[in-house]
Amino acid sequence: MEPTVVSEKWSRVKLAFVVNDIATEQAVYTTTRLGVAATNRGWEAWTISVGDLAYDSDEQVKATARRVPRQRYKTGSAYLRDLQGPNTVQERVVVDDLDVLMLRNDPSTEKGRRDWAKTAAIDFGRIAMRHGVIVLNDPNGLAKAQTKMYFQTFPEEVRPETLITRNRSEIKAFVADRGRVVLKPLQGSGGEGVFLVRHDDAANLNQIIDAVSRDGYVIAQEYLTRAEEGDTRLFLMNGSPLRHRGRYAAFRRVRQGGDMRSNIHAGGSLAKAVLDDDAFSLSEMVRPKLVQDGMFLVGLDIVGDKLMEINVFTPGGLGSAQKLEGVNFTEAVLDALARKVEYMRFYQRKFDNREMATL
């Protein structure tokens, strides 16, 4: 559905993004692009490092937050320079007074560094949601998705055949039976710790299993031969493919050389996506659960007629889709947020995030 323009009466939205750490944000991040677009609309757009959230003795959720001093920005670099620099506006804000809180931190990057930060945004988001703030993606849904086990709760038709175990013999048997298998950690992101193994890799298999299982369970997954052509990232919003001005928010990632990973920071390159019936069929099959779990903005990683992954924490690459399609998809995202806020204000009552999922 094409986004509609909300009424001028509700045009000013109080919004905050929760990120791992403001100091490590980058201009190309989707969160930065959303911040620029929100600021240029005249919204009150704050950014909060996950460690700056607090639950006060007055039973309100508060945070030391930052926002940029200017009203318009042409580039993400200029926006981020002001947000991270001495010109930033810093205040202790009442999170409960916001219209929207977007949880844009990635718990998997905190592994081994700041374990306390993995669930902090989810925990504080639950309290803010209870006080009437629209929290996206829904913290209760995100709590279910903290490992890749979440992927296994979606229909079997969308997933490669998978084994999740720490048992070395079971992994070896899976590899021997299927010939080629992808091994990766149950927790992690961005292609970290991902290996393609073959049945004749017996000499190295023990070492690979040791490396992958160092931090927990191992995922052994059927190798999708069409992955050699790359994969497609398709964004879903409110459970449906994100579309704006007749274009879909999607792009294709192509491998470079012999690296099996197509992640951009793992050396992959970008190309325009060609969406087929398989892509739309997959998105329709996962839609009911995503809506049920209150997942507002999601990235599907598609290979042929299967999904490799469903990204619900900080799905990135919206700028890549924008560049390839010539459409500013952040505007569609903000239009959707504005509709939710207008709905809440009009009815003057709290709504469960799952009730808001398709608005």
Image (cartoon, helix red, strand yellow):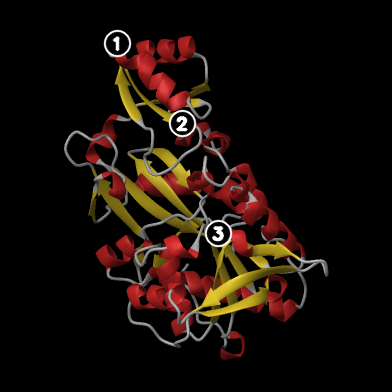
Marks 1 and 2, how far apart in space? 20 Å
Residue 37 location, x and y as percent?
Answer: 43, 77
Q: Determine whether the residue tagged by mark 2 lies in a helix, strand or loop.
A: strand
The image's mark for residue 142 is none
Place residue 302 in its image quadrant. top left
The reply to whether residue 150 is in sight is yes
Residue 278 location, x and y as percent?
Answer: 37, 43
Residue 42 location, x and y as percent?
Answer: 50, 86
Determine contact: label 1, label 2, CB under 8 Å: no
Q: Earlier in the sequence, mark 3 or mark 2?
A: 2
Left or right: 329 in relation to 22? left
Q: Residue furthest right?
A: 58
Q: Which residue does the image show at 42% across and 10% down from the upper left?
A: 173
The image's mark for residue 296 is 3
Q: Determine whether the residue tagged by mark 1 lies in a helix, strand or loop.
A: helix
Q: Is residue 216 above or below residue 20?
A: above
Q: Which residue does the image show at 47% across and 24% down from the upper left?
A: 213
Q: Amino acid at mark 3?
A: Phe
Q: Determine whether the residue tagged by mark 3 lies in a helix, strand or loop.
A: loop
Q: Amino acid at mark 2?
A: Pro
Q: Earlier in the sequence, mark 1 or mark 2?
A: 2
Disc 2 marks which residue?
185
Marks 1 and 3, how far apart in space? 45 Å
Q: Amino acid at mark 1?
A: Ala
Q: Nearer the viewer, mark 3 or mark 2?
A: 2
Residue 147 location, x and y as percent?
Answer: 55, 38
The image's mark for residue 203 is 1
Determine contact: label 3, label 2, CB under 8 Å: no
